[in-house]
Amino acid sequence: MEQNYRQIPSVDTVLSSERISKLCQDFSQPMVKDLVREILEKIRTDISKGNLKHNKMAIYDRIEEESRLRWNDWPVRAINATGVILHTNMGRAPISPESSTTASNGSEGYSNLEIDLKTGARGSRQSHITGLLCDITGSDSAYVTNNNAAALFLGLAAIAHGKEVIISRSESIEIGGGFRIPDVLDHSGATLREIGTTNKTYGEDYRAAINENTGAILSVHASNFKIIGFTHSADISEISAIGTDTNIPVLHDLGSGCLLDTTKFGLSQEPRPQDSISSGSTLCFFSGDKLLGGPQAGIIVGKKKYVDAIARHPLARAFRIDKFSLAALHKTLLHYIRGEAESKIPIWKMISMPSEKIRDRALQLQQSLSLNGAVEPGKSTIGGGSLPGEEIETFLLSINTLQPDHFGKLLRRASTPVVSRIEENRLILDLRTVLPEEDTQLKQSLQEVIKAQ
């Protein structure tokens, strides 16, 4: 074993090698030196545990690979060929090129983020976005935070701190990332008051639960699951009417932030913020990076009195949206104002794309590469905690390979990474979630993998 320790090169020897000296040109030399020391120490530990396999080239490989993992640009552009439109692990909604350009232009230099160019006085970063949201949803006012969990927490803290919040037992749910509505309520300073049963809650259940310590009624749309069968729930119009009669604010958490009519695409009706507002809800909460198709954001629309209370809360600054996301969201909302959401916003381009067009693209890709496989009918899903169980007709390109998992791994490591899925021991590509302008890149990545095999 002592002989194996002596074979480990010194730090200076490694740094002077051609391969590692190049790393010192690409990155800070002190950082590379620290990395070399760390890797060599790990190799000593491996030897002490009986792992005696090492050589100089393998050490250099390990250092280079670790440097790439730590110090290369991240995140990198990847192609989503899974057929899951709002893929949480891949960043949910991709924003439009116009939104990206607007965000970049407003961030690369100085901007009028919080200055009134007409008067020169300080302005609000919320004012421009508020106007657009009010125009789109018909609300009195609006406020934007960094995500929807923050928006809901802030709304509860500002309106119902120290009071009871009435919620249907079927809506006391867990949302993404392990966050649970009861926990959000608890940490906001509000107390949960569950009503009804798991499968049935009536309007009268809400009315009967109201007392002198009621701070709000909370209705949460089940955006990532379905309860079917022997069920009943009061709709937002009925709940809002009860809130109006009793002077109790009704908070409606929609989650996905869908602004279009989903039935025109063959999907079930997803509740929309503008419908919530017209139905009488006091405040409506939704995400920016789901079916709205923009950047991560938590959006609050509703009655000005309550929105103002949220804006004044001490935690509002802690949950403030950053300038990059705000600019991208503003441009995304302009797509709706201009009636171009289906032609400009990527997720709506994907959802509205005819399956026949996807079939033609898949066939062209298969034939151009002479792939051993088939183009066959299949299903795409919405994902991202939106329209649970809903599927869209599509065509899948299946690739027959002896090692589909290995093929998929190589695709993920291509110069332009491609994420696919495996079904029945076949590698599957669903081009619904691949934008037409990405077809050339997808073809190049496939060519790389075919050559590597």
Image (spheres, rainbow, N blue to C red):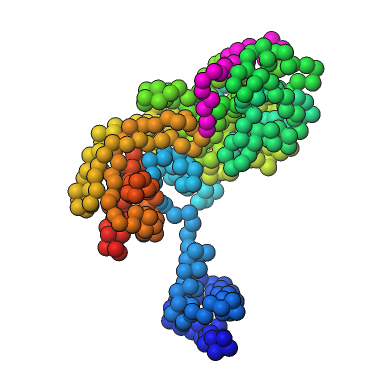
Regarding residue 41, the answer to whether it shows in the image is: no
- Which of the 4 image quadrants contains residue 341? top left
Q: Nearer the viewer, residue 106 or 390?
A: 390
Q: Residue at x 63, y 39 (%)?
A: 179
Q: Residue at x 73, y 16 (%)?
A: 209
Give the total number of marks visible in the rendering: 0
Q: Give the quadrant of the N terminus.
A: bottom right
Is residue 256 toward the left or the right of residue 57 in the image? right
- Which of the 4 image quadrants contains residue 41? bottom right
Q: Nearer the viewer, residue 317 or 62?
A: 62
Asked if the stretch drawn in magenta spans residue 323, the answer is no
Q: Residue at x 49, y 57 (%)?
A: 74
- Residue 285: where, in percent of width, then height? 59, 29
Q: Give the quadrant of the C terminus.
A: bottom left
Picture layout, residue 356 above or below residue 427: above
Is residue 214 toward the left or the right of residue 129 in the image? right
Is residue 215 toward the left or the right of residue 423 in the image? right
Regarding residue 442, the answer to whether it shows in the image is: yes
Q: Residue at x 37, y 52 (%)?
A: 418
Outermost residue on the top side: it is 245
- Residue 175: where, in percent of width, then height? 59, 36
Picture layout, residue 312 above or below residue 11: above
Asked if the stretch drawn in magenta spans residue 230, the answer is yes
- Residue 278: where, in percent of width, then height? 55, 16
- Residue 266: where, in percent of width, then height? 37, 24
State which region is magenta: 223-247
Q: Nearer the viewer, residue 400 or 154?
A: 400
Picture layout, residue 280 above or below residue 72: above
Q: Nearer the viewer, residue 283 or 102?
A: 283
